[in-house]
Image (tube, coloured by chain):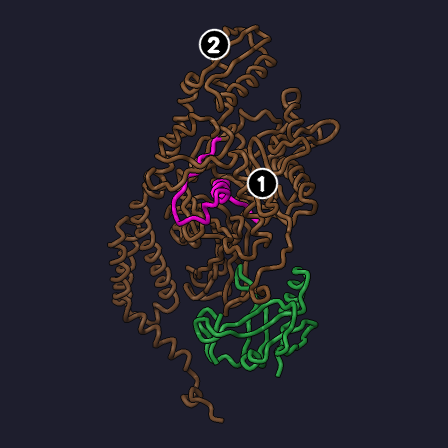
Chain colours: A green, B brown
Amino acid sequence: MAVTLTQAAADRVSSFIANRGKGLGVRLGVKTSGCSGMAYIIEFVDETGEDDTIFEDHGVKVIIDKKSLIYLDGTELDFGKEGLNEGFKFNNPNAKNECGCGESFTI
Amino acid sequence: MALLQIAEPGQTEAPHQHRLAAGIDLGTTNSLVAAVRSGQAQTLADKQQEHLLPSVVAYTEFGIIVGEEAQQQQIADPLNTMSSIKRLMGRGVEDLRLLGDELPYRFAATDSAVPRIQTRRGNVTPVEVSAEILKVLQQRAEEALGGALSGVVVTVPAYFDDAQRQATKDAAGLAGLNVFRLLNEPTAAAIAYGLDKSADGIHAIYDLGGGTFDISILRLNKGVFEVMATGGDSALGGDDFDHLIAEWIIAQADISEMDAGLQRQLMQVARSVKESLTQHERAGIDVSSVGWQGELDRHTFNQLVDPLIRKTIIACRRALRDAGITAEEIEDVVMVGGSTRVPRVRELVSEFFGREPLVDIDPDRVVAIGAAVQADILAGNKPDAEILLLDVTPLSLGIETMGGLVETIIPRNTTIPVARAQEFTTFKDGQSAMAVHVVQGERDLVADCRSLARFELRGIPPMVAGAARIRVTFQVDADGLLSVEAEEQTQHVSASIEVKPSYGLSDKEIADMLRASMEHADDDVKFRQLREQQVEAERVIEALTAALAKDGVQLLNDDERQLIDAALQQLQQLAYGDDAAAIEAGVKSLEQSCDFYVERRMNSSIHDAMAGHNIHEFDTPEK
């Protein structure tokens, strides 16, 4: 089981954490809700919990709780720009359907 | 796929890590800086406890001085003392001729579009002069806040165009400031009163300063302030009140001999009389140098200044008309500018709008305070605040298409930042370049709009007319500055331009452009329809002529050729006329007359493609 980051995503996460001044890494997760079943979570991490699995890729720690890992296994986190907008994208092989806005998915 | 941002853990409150930010009101007469401290926005004072910094820069033998001290130099050394430089921001040399006679400066002869003023410390541009003012405010803020500023919000009049906004941004850059964004002055005033957090509604911002008057009608729509109309008078303000009082004293005291010294003294006396009458019913006057003492009561003062205030009310009425609303629809009236302290101004304004204006915040400081609130949010100090206030484009932006028509890409009052793209195609076979003409305005014809920039996209691969796909992207950043890119979609050749026009539009010109678009709406629609049909006719004629030249002889006999030529000629004649419907019918009829020819051409090209090949070659190859 693994979750990876692209170089671009890793660079961004590192610089965001540096800007923020602290943080162990980035937490990826899922929660129910959103317009198509599940919604992604992406947060800074200040402390890890018992149920967390920690991956490291390009020098950045990715922290995921057990339950979310089932949905996110194999996911690659990318960073991209669309016009004026920029942000992170989940390339999740488990997702079968995405809603139009891409903020949620079903498996 | 949506682009996500990293949130704080559990999206809980962010650890309070305050980033220093300030709001700057870069005014024509005075400038201010404000910041949010302990949750409260307030203007910052200098060491003498003065909040207002006169927007005056003196280039002296000993160095550059800004503010009060510079103002004192003005009479002795007018050529090296720059005041009201804001009026020149973003203006071209051409514009100066229009302002010409009222400017006491020596302009250096230059071939650049930006005017340069000669001083004893070399030639300076309005941007450089403004940067000097900003540097002083920056230093004040950094001393007051105890650290470097992460960024600032600088306010500009709502009617400032791209060139004037860019010049303001350049000045901040030159001063070493990071500009989070530029903010419209009336919008800043509205934010200071928290109107952005109120329900949707329409607000009037009445701004009577020392030398200028501005009225802005803003509509708050889903948290966004749209500028519905602006108006005003760039040569009307509190200084004119002082003049009237001085004249009254001259008449009363029967002063016949004037000199510069007495004139100055009288203006100072007049000013203090005006200020005194804000609190008191009457004010004593003592002009000791001519041995005259007297008294001015508020009633007489009101009579003196009434005509001037009425002028502002007329401008208000006009702005309401431009916005297409009545005074009853105005939710709140915000008072901005020191001259709105005059009780008579408040009276007439509240009478006109039928409600008490908002006056709780010091009218000199309200714009800077609003800018500071915005700067604090943009610095990221309020993670919970969803209000990322947006501005809108004051006029539509588009490009010229065939026939001198405007294709709007970003409509007026679109919230910024924004990026919009549209695809265009070529008009002629083998066309290898395309001229992109960027225009601003509400009219349908390029000739009636303002030209912002032109550039050419070259290297379009040769294709038949209409086959090329050229994507034109307009992007307006948070400060209202425009960049345009054209990209050919198959080979990805592209060209782009940043719009920094050297000439400015005045608020009156913008208002005139808007008004003209309303008045000429019917004509514009008719003309657009006509031009569209004409362009379509031209396109069909062009395509048909090209086709005939290529294979007309092989595919058509003499009779058929004559039939097509006649239809073609008929359309050519119609296209010169001004009947859109007739041209449309002509195009249809030509297309009908050519149906058989088009069919024959298609068959012929398929035939050509297959000629010399065995039919089996077209079968799907088997593995």
Q: What span is colored magenta in the figure?
A: B181-208
Residue appearing at x 42%, y 45% in the figure = B441
**Vertical position of residue B146 compared to residue B72: above or below:** below
Residue appearing at x 73%, y 30% in the figure = B63
- Asked where in the image residue B301 lies, by quadrant, the reply is top left
- Rendering coords of residue B549 (x, y %): 38, 64
Q: Is residue B400 left or right of residue B77?
A: left
**Vertical position of residue B414 compared to residue B275: above or below:** below
On whether residue B206 falls in the magenta region, the answer is yes
Q: What residue would you read off at disc 1? A: B42
Pick the front one: B94 or B147: B147
Same chain letter for marks 2 and 1: yes
Q: Is residue B297 left or right of residue B129?
A: left
Q: Chain for mark 1?
A: B
Residue B251 shows which numbered tag? 2
**Vertical position of residue B273 compared to residue B154: above or below:** above
- Label 2 vs label 1: CA separation? 43 Å
Is residue B252 visible to us here? yes
Is residue B508 visible to us here? no
**Vertical position of residue B91 compared to residue B498: above or below:** above
Residue appearing at x 42%, y 86% in the figure = B618
Task: Give the secondary structure at mark 1.
Answer: strand
Residue appearing at x 75%, y 28% in the figure = B62
Residue density around tag 1, few if under 14, some if 14–19, many if 20 or more, within 10 Å: many
Q: Nearer the viewer, mark 2 or mark 1?
A: 1
- Rendering coords of residue B226 (x, y %): 43, 47
- Asked where in the image residue A81 lies, by quadrant, the reply is bottom right
- Rendering coords of residue B448 (x, y %): 39, 43
Task: Give the secondary structure at mark 2.
Answer: helix
Q: Chain for mark 2?
A: B
Q: Hey, what amino acid is under mark 2? A: Ala
